[in-house]
Amino acid sequence: MSLTSSAAPAAVPVDPELAAVLAAFAGLPPMTAEMIPLLRRPNPMAPTDADLADGGRFTVEERAVPGPQGAPEVRLLICRPTGAVAPVGAVYYMHGGGMVLGDNRMGVTEPLAWARDLGLAVVSVDYRLAPDTPHPGPVEDCYAGLVWTAAAAGELGIDPDRIVVAGTSAGGGLAAALALMARDRGGPALAGQVLMAPMLDDRNDTVSAVQMAGHGLWDRAANEMGWTALLGVDRGGPDVSPYAAPARADDLSGLPPAIIDVGSAETFRDEDVAYAGRLWAAGGQAELHVWPGGFHGFDTVAPQAQISQEAQAARLRWLRRQLAP
């Protein structure tokens, strides 16, 4: 459902506990393309190898693996449970950042929390970023890393039948795209897809996109900037690939089970709900959560809030069911 009228409905209120956290971001300038170089500066808070190793619980390494044909190698951050004696399930993770920001350490702490609880490995991919690398570069990087991971499963101690793709925001869109690519190309068989507030639709015209313009941490203007960086003048046009914007896919049949979650007070709400509905309509399996009063990224910036704890627990329960040996 889209809404192009200038008379947008009132914004959905933010959960009171989250609103107190969101208020701290009120003075930030709008996200524009001109801000990208500044926001790409090294993050002094990024987790180190020692942080990721978690007191020896994981072995941590970075590897450069073959990228798409004619493209540079892809760097993978690989965290494996120390001392595992049998092949383990794995989360192949793609970070958020609106297609223009981030690296393979951004957001990886939540997949590592799943790994601690469930005895999993985590592989996080450092895909090239737009606008320096427009579509299809970023998603092809992710796919090349996934193919390598599945092929190297024996060496890595990973069970190739228990690999899920996962991502947040832009990374959630990339995870959905990988599920489509793996199906269409006869690629790795995936055990599931974890789509956390995924960025799925370049048209940016749903009710929630219009309704929540100017609200939260990733609004309609920021979303337009991210999609334009990825697609250029093709954004919103008739010929956008579903591997760039999975909402464009005509056929959602034959995809692995999905969990999709999103906040009710954010841009991506309606495109994510629609994607879940289309998965069901195609005979697929999807678990959908719309967290009341959640803004984009609420569980990252306010992880101790009650609603954030519930969202994190729901994802862990789903993964436990999906990746049981």
Image (spheres, rainbow, N blue to C red):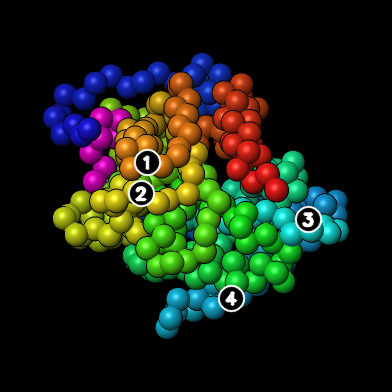
Tag of residue 65: 4
Q: Which of marks 3 and 4 is nearer the N terminus?
A: 4
Q: Report the mark closest to the observer, 3 or 2.
A: 2
Q: Distance between the residues labelled 2 and 1?
A: 6 Å
Q: Which of marks 3 and 2 is nearer the N terminus?
A: 3
The answer to whether mark 2 and mark 1 are in CB contact below 8 A is yes
At label 2, which amino acid type do we have?
A: Ser
The relative height of residue 19 versus residue 177 in the rendered view (above or below) is above
Q: Residue furthest front?
A: 283
Residue 139 drawn in magenta: no
Q: Mark 2 points at which residue?
A: 253
Q: Residue furthest bottom?
A: 70
The answer to whether mark 3 and mark 4 are in CB contact below 8 A is no
Q: How far apart are marks 1 and 4 (CA)?
A: 35 Å
Q: What element carries label 1?
A: loop
Q: Residues within 10 Å of mark 2 (few under 14, many from 20)?
A: some
At label 3, which amino acid type do we have?
A: Pro
Q: Which of marks 3 and 1 is nearer the N terminus?
A: 3
Q: What element carries label 2?
A: loop
Q: Report the mark closest to the observer, 3 or 1.
A: 1
Q: Distance between the residues labelled 3 and 2?
A: 34 Å
Tag of residue 283: 1
In this view of the protein, which residue sits in the foreground, 33 or 200?
200
At label 4, which amino acid type do we have?
A: Val
What percent of the width, then of the height, locates residue 111?
A: 64, 47
In this view of the protein, which residue sits in the foreground, 161 or 100?
161
Q: Name the residue under label 3.
A: 81
Q: Which residue lies furthest to the left in this view?
A: 5
Q: Residues within 10 Å of mark 1 (few under 14, many from 20)?
A: few
Q: What residue range appears in magenta?
A: 203-210
Residue 98 in view, yes or no:
no
Q: Earlier in the sequence, mark 1 or mark 4?
A: 4
